[in-house]
Amino acid sequence: MRFGFFLREALRGLRRSSAPALAALLTVVITALVLGVFIPIVQATTGTANEVRNRVVVDAYLKDSATEADRVQVQRELEATAGVKSVEYISKDEALRELGHKVRDADDAIELLGSNPLPSLFRITPDDPDELNAIVAQIAPGGTPRLDAIDDVQNRESETGKILSATGLVKGLGAVMAGLLILASIALIANTIRLSVFARRREVEVMKLVGATNWFIRWPFVIEGVIVGFLGGVLSVVLLAIAKTTVVDPLSDRFALLAAPDTIDFPLLVVLLLFACVAVSAIGSGITLRRFLRV
Amino acid sequence: MGRLMASVPTQTQAGRARSRPAGRDVPVVEFRDVTKVYDGGSVGLERASVKIGRGEFVFLVGPTGCGKSTCIRLLMKELEPTKGEIDIAGKTLNDMPRARVPYLRRNIGTIFQDFKLLPNRTVYDNVAYSLQVIGESRQEIRRKVPDILRMVGLSTKLHNFPTELSGGEQQRVSIARAFVNHPPLLLADEPTGNLDPETSIGIMQLIYRINRTGTTVIVATHDKEMVDKMRRRVVELREGRIVRDEQSGLYQPDESTTEFAIRLRGELGVGDEGHPN
């Protein structure tokens, strides 16, 4: 019975002061829309950045004189090195084939040379791209490889440095932007709610005078917040879904970037947005009331 | 008395510690040396002591700013006294925790000069709200609200909004709201301040009828005519002090009580500008 009463009170409140409620609803819709667009974008960017970072590798070239036994020993040693995620063996022939993919006339050049000049190599992928230099230092302290069978160790230093700093910046910026946007959304919604509660502070005062407890006054406002937040969330989710099916999905068939693998699932995004809208507006209206309840 | 005690069954231990045994002789309201100084330094009430017994009808009179409203607001625990103690039905308000204040107010009906109705509710809903607050069932509300509205003479305006009513009608609604759950104490702060003399009489009649049911009534007013006609107990305040307290008094004291007041305060001619005549 109590809940029914509070619900009726909340609906009455929405009906009687529909202008501020509409303003709050619109604010929720807009901020949820912006967040709904921005979250996948940030994720796609960080996903791409991470992918690029994972391309950072160390190549350890074997001497041509290395025997099969040397090769096995080197592989075992490399795999035992701290911070190494995986070690991949690329034989001379595979190296040539790889080159063939990148350089068009490689085959002609090899034919001209008469033999395959490419060394066989181990490609080392680190656990953490930032730890790359530490791995190099372990395999080849001071530039000379510890194992005789290894001819040279290369981590394409300049390239690696650029990749790491650029992707780091992108990830950092994305995180800061997302944080700011979420803060701004909360502040905006809370402020709009504060306005609509402020418009009814006299009412709250009268309720206190006839002996209503704080929660008796607060519940209808919180339920109003839930309703506004939920409606706003649903509206923005519908708009997002329309935008997704009409704009993003056809595009993503053509462009790899938009189909970046680790963007958030749409259903999860929907649930998150709805929950955030409801929570922010409900808690917002509950907290704003506190000022006017001190009579 | 018994009604007030019974309807506050869950008094906290803190509240109970200071309370005395309730009996016929315990005043409904007692101010003991109460001083209220506002934050700005202005004095609302100064060393006021007064006892009001059960079923009494008391006028608080005096010019604007003399402390009438301060008294009313102290009784509702909207304000805290700076010094001294206030008892209601033997319970000291100073000790009452904040969370108990709503339960105190449910036992005090209040009427204000500006009516303080909920603007977006009908007459019926305004009165029903004070029953909903105490958790009254819907059947009870449906039974009681039309009854009380009939008593104040508004049975035809159940579904009008406050803005559609005249001042006198709005005040009747607020009286209905204050009395619908039959509180043992009724406070009225300038109930006729915004109304013409003819309407005022009707309002005062209602308040008097409520008093006749055994409810203690305290009316703060500067409606001289009304006080003079009704001849009830008058407590006069000036600059925060109680300067006169007499049974069945006039708004302005007759000769002897003036002399008494002068003797009491040891000075002449203070605050006369607030008095007509």
Image (spheres, coloured by chain):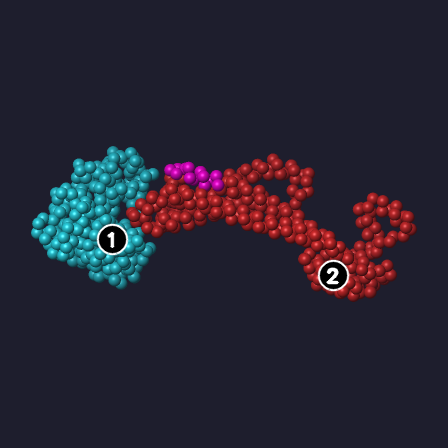
Chain colours: A red, B cyan
Q: Is residue A136 visible?
A: yes
Q: Main secondary structure of the magenta part?
A: helix
Q: Which residue is mark 2?
A: A136
Residue in view at x 49 percent, y 42 percent: A28
The outermost residue toward the front is: B268
Helix, strand or loop at label 2? It is helix
Q: Residue at x 85, y 61 (%)?
A: A66
Quadrant assignment for the C terminus of chain B: top left
Amino acid bearing label 1: Gly
- List x then y, in percent, for residue A64: 86, 59
Q: Amino acid at mark 2?
A: Val
Image quadrant for the N terminus of chain B? bottom left
Chain identifier of the residue bearing label 1 in the image: B
Which residue in the structure is indicated by mark 1?
B44
A98 left or right, relative to A287:
right
Q: How many marks?
A: 2
Mark number displayed over residue B5: none
